[in-house]
Amino acid sequence: MLDVIKNTIAAGQSINREQALHLLTKVDLLTVGQMADQQRLLRHPDKYVSFVVDRNVNYSNICSCKCRFCAFYRDENDSDAYLLSFDEIFAKVQELVDNGGTQLLMQGGVHPNLKIEWFEELFRQLSDRFPTVQIHSLSPAEIIQIATLSDISVEQCLRRLQAAGLKSIPGGGAEVLVDEVRQTISPNKIGWRQWAEVMEQAHELGMKTTATLMFGSCETAEQVVEHLFRVREIQERSGGFTAFISWTFQPSNTELGGTSATGCDYLKVVALSRLVLDNIENIQASWVTQGDKIAQIALRFGANDLGGTMLEENVVAAAGVSFRMSQQQLIELARDAGFIPVRRTTGYKVLEVY
């Protein structure tokens, strides 16, 4: 079957679910990695490896979903529960701007009380104060919650947030887009079809988004493949995904517990995502969860982007994983792997070549 798969890809055709599962479960890591590297080179012959200077501001850790894989969430009455004030958020964004940042990734818990007016006022003030920063914020689960609490449709919610200054949406909360998995690890969170609905509605409104995968909890290889194909099919319909990012479940301090997937598992999934998602331009390496060395290797397994500099990150850190990298370290990481580092916008426009 491997020769058939290689011929299919060489002919510019998309592989199917059976072929993807064969690559994931039957073909050795280096072979799949080499295939992905070839596709990466065809798609990005300039050898650019991109990154964005950003900050992840977690505006609250209060969350009603209480996902079993999450070590970050708190109940509203917990002693360490918080909701940042606007001034606290502005101070963090000012620090981002002072460091040359252009992207604000803002996510919190699925808050039980915050209605759309809170976000509209925040986004308006952020847009007025920091016009050079793109608000790339909120997950589909948060948007569904805001719409529900505010008694408006998802489309109305997105239109109002967009008018207030929301420019694009990260793909957080996807986990695995199979409801059997979601019922086990996040039974109180939205189902995969609601995640897809938010993304497709956003794409229709001209908002770009990313797509993600968190694997290594309890899903099967078949379910990983299904996730990738559901992302590909959404992209076929609406075309708004700019990038795909996968990372491994981090079990420390979580209710779910267990063990982490290996670096080899991670690289295999990165490579497979490059081969399956032939309609998504960019594949991101997750140094935040994997560390710099595995992320660097991922650049030879199909990835072409290193995500953000992440001046702040709290969700993964709550699970005991705290890799930190400066902008200069990201530049050197890409350069040492034989690539040309470039700083980009959220929309992947090149700002500076190093």
Image (cartoon, helix red, strand yellow):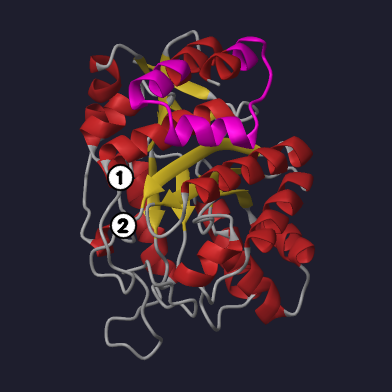
Residue carrying label 2? 316
Residue at the image point whose x is 43% and y is 52% from the top: 214
Q: Where is the C terminus found, in terms of image quarters?
A: top left
Is residue 283 in sight in this rendering?
no
Residue 275 lies in quadrant: top right
- State if disc 2 and disc 1 touch (CB < 8 Å): yes
x and y, in percent, of residue 11 in the image: 67, 10
Q: Which is more toward the observer, 341 or 245?
A: 245
Task: Name the element at disc 2.
Answer: loop
Between discs 1 and 2, the one toward the N terminus: 1
Q: Which is more toward the observer, 190 or 122?
A: 190
Q: Where is the N terminus found, in terms of image quarters?
A: top right
Residue 34 lies in quadrant: top left
Magenta stretch in the rendered image: 7-35
Q: Amino acid at mark 2?
A: Val
Residue at the image point whose x is 22% and y is 29% from the top: 329
Q: Crowdedness of circle 1 by 10 Å Cα count: few (<14), some, many (20+)?
A: many
